Amino acid sequence: MDAHRVWAEVDLDALTHNLSRIRHRLTSRVAVMLVVKADAYGHGAVAVVHHALRCGVQALGVGTSAEALELRAAGVRAPILVLGTIVDEEATACLRHGVDIALHSLDRAHMLQELGHRLGSAARVHVKVDTGMGRLGVLPERALDLLRAVQGSSHLVLRGLMTHVAAPQGASAVEAIEQLNLFEAVLRQARSRSLVSGWVHAANSACIFTGLGNGYDAVRPGISAYGVLPEGIAGCEELQPVLS
């Protein structure tokens, strides 16, 4: 008799399928940063990540530094970006293990610069612009100042410029287009001043499946990789549930 009456099965072949459907919607120049926060949405981050990297995923997004360090301890050497915030005590481990950090304020930039100087190791950052999510990010009108601070710092390396689209409907939501227009205005100004390097990225699952995936250098699919899309978005029938 089985010892367990209830169990979860994770189908990595379904993950392969879903990643291929995501890739099918993108041009070859667009990189995929798979979001594996919250233990890969409960699917088991370490196993999911190793498989996803074999499938061609180029980078990983996590919610916390602890999640990033768990992956480093499991032998993952691909780029990892902490999409959420980190507390000061976590920054040293991020620098020592080459973990990218979302940067959203001048205070945090100064802290990372000082820490990097003490450790003799540069902090790798993605400047995050809050275009309407209202969670983390520098306001658009202050983004250039933050980018200038990064460029002028000896121990900060700009690895990307990003925003997060709040509307779960993707391109079908007016708010999403307004957000991307704000982000595009920041990007134009930053590029005109040679302040941008690394990946520019904004699109999540909803954006990818509503035609907004090819605008920048990378996309950040999350739930679509696991077989789910927000209600009302076409394409869910193409995906397979990874967890049962």
Image (tube, helix red, strand yellow):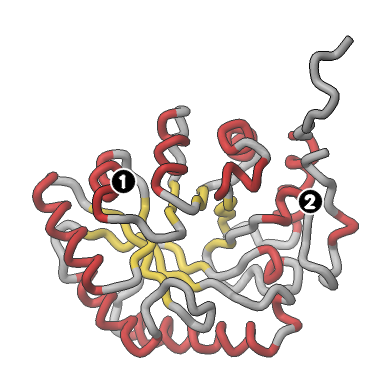
Rate crowding at label 2 as few (under 14), some (14 to 19) or many (20 or more) other CA atoms within 10 Å. many
Task: Name the side, left or right, on which 91 lies relative to 176.
Answer: left
Q: Residue at x 35, y 56 (%)?
A: 86
Q: Earlier in the sequence, mark 2 or mark 1?
A: 1
Find the residue positioned furthest to the left.
Answer: 118
Q: Residue at x 73, y 56 (%)?
A: 224
Can you tell which quarter of the image residue 22 is in? bottom right
Q: Residue at x 67, y 74 (%)?
A: 212
Task: Name the side, left or right, on which 200 lies relative to 38.
Answer: left
Q: Are marks 2 and 1 in contact (CB under 8 Å)?
A: no
Q: For mark 2, what is the residue?
A: 227
Image mark for residue 52: none
Q: For mark 1, what is the residue?
A: 94
Rate crowding at label 1 as few (under 14), some (14 to 19) or many (20 or more) other CA atoms within 10 Å. many
Amino acid type, label 2: Gly
Residue 7 or 140: which is nearer the viewer?
Answer: 7
Give the answer, above or below, for where 103 lies relative to 144.
Answer: above
Give the answer, above or below, for where 139 lies relative to 48.
Answer: below
Q: Residue at x 31, y 39 (%)?
A: 97
Numbered disc 1: secondary structure: helix
Quadrant (top left, top right, bottom left, bottom right) of the N terminus: top right
Numbered disc 2: secondary structure: loop
- The CA span between labels 2 and 1 is 31 Å
Quadrant (top left, top right, bottom left, bottom right) of the C terminus: top right
Amino acid type, label 1: Cys
